[in-house]
Image (cartoon, rainbow, N blue to C red):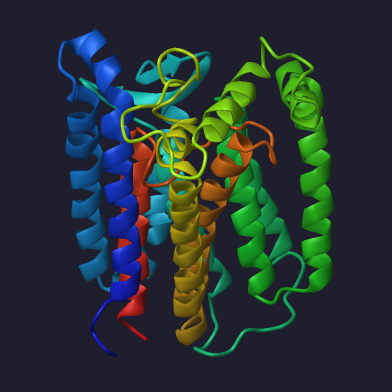
Amino acid sequence: MRKKPDYFLVAIVLSLIFLGILILASVSSPFSQEKFGHPSYFLFHQIGLGILPGIGLGFLAFFCPLTFLRKWIPIIFLINLLLLILVFSPLGASFGGATRWLKFGPIFFQPSEFLKLSFLVYLAAWLARDRAPGQIKKKKEFNQNLVPFLVMIGIISLGLIFQPDISTLGVLVICAGVLYFLAKTPLWHSLVLFLIGISSLIALIKVAPYRMARILVFLDPQTDPLGIGYQIKQALIAIGSGGILGLGLGLSQQKFGFLPQPMSDSIFAVFAEESGFLGATLLISLFFLFLFRGIQISKKVNDNFLKLSAVGICCWISLQALINIGSMIGILPLSGTPLPFISYGGSHLIAELTGVGILLNISKNL
């Protein structure tokens, strides 16, 4: 063991956090001034209830013995499932027609954001069970792998569908499918999972008309330019207005009531407007480097639990970045997925930084 973390990965994450602070300071200032009479309210809120707690839990995850994590992750995952169910109790809070938050006094948080991390690490431990380091069995009985996996996905799906939080469900299902495949389970298992996933997606789209409307707008943004298509239209205007070098930090025009959700879902569009093509390319490159470094860490580690955990964490964060940015530039449907390390919101940021702490912990065990 080299006992030192991957400093290149640390530099990537710190760069993303720094860019997030810069763009949030720019985007949030008019809303903070209007609502609270202070231009930095949302920025300080993000730092105090997102970045600092996230760094604290990240350090805890970095120094936590990985054997301890593997032992207790089933309990952590179970607690997270219970919190997910509690959003439907009087402790739950609803915003914009979705019930995704728990409220404890003045503090709100989303259990589904922490579920991404706890489930993927638990799944890594489950898939690596009873296997010696460096050995992965190629064949497992149907009732030992596929059925329990489908049961776990089914339980999580019920909790997320009723919130509803289909974007989180999609991220979890894709990342879980990647881990299941990489565990060298029989290929036909993965094919069955793929068919079930496609069938379930079609069913979810059919039962909720607004999901079908999003698909139609994605295929033709002019279908409803003043309705569902409004956000993507304004996002493309913002990105195009940035040109090569951008309008300059704080000089975005679209954030002033034209672009919906400029601090969260649409923050990439504002960043591209203010920093231009070069700034957007830098941000996208950082996420590619994060994915590359995470994969490199997973390839070098011998323990299967650590290997799958590293893949799950880097897949989750990178996939969310792809979905968010892809929806803003029109290559994917709008989803409401936050941009990791950048979008306003404490829950996703704390979960991501905790995941980075685990990833760095794995990197020092190479």
Question: Which of these two is toward me, 244 or 33?
Answer: 244
Q: Is residue 238 visible?
A: yes
Residue 332 lies in quadrant: top right
Question: Which of these two is toward me, 109 or 145?
Answer: 109
Q: Residue at x 32, y 43 (%)?
A: 20
Residue 164 appears left or right of 44:
right
Q: Residue at x 77, y 55 (%)?
A: 193
Question: Which of these two is toward me, 244 or 40?
Answer: 244
Residue 84 lies in quadrant: top left
Residue 201 lies in quadrant: top right
Image location of residue 15, percent across then percent down: 31, 56
Above or below, comparing residue 116 to residue 358 in the picture: above
Image location of residue 4, percent across then percent down: 24, 81
Above or below, comparing residue 358 to residue 28 in the picture: below
Residue 5 appears left or right of 189:
left
Image location of residue 289, percent across then percent down: 46, 66
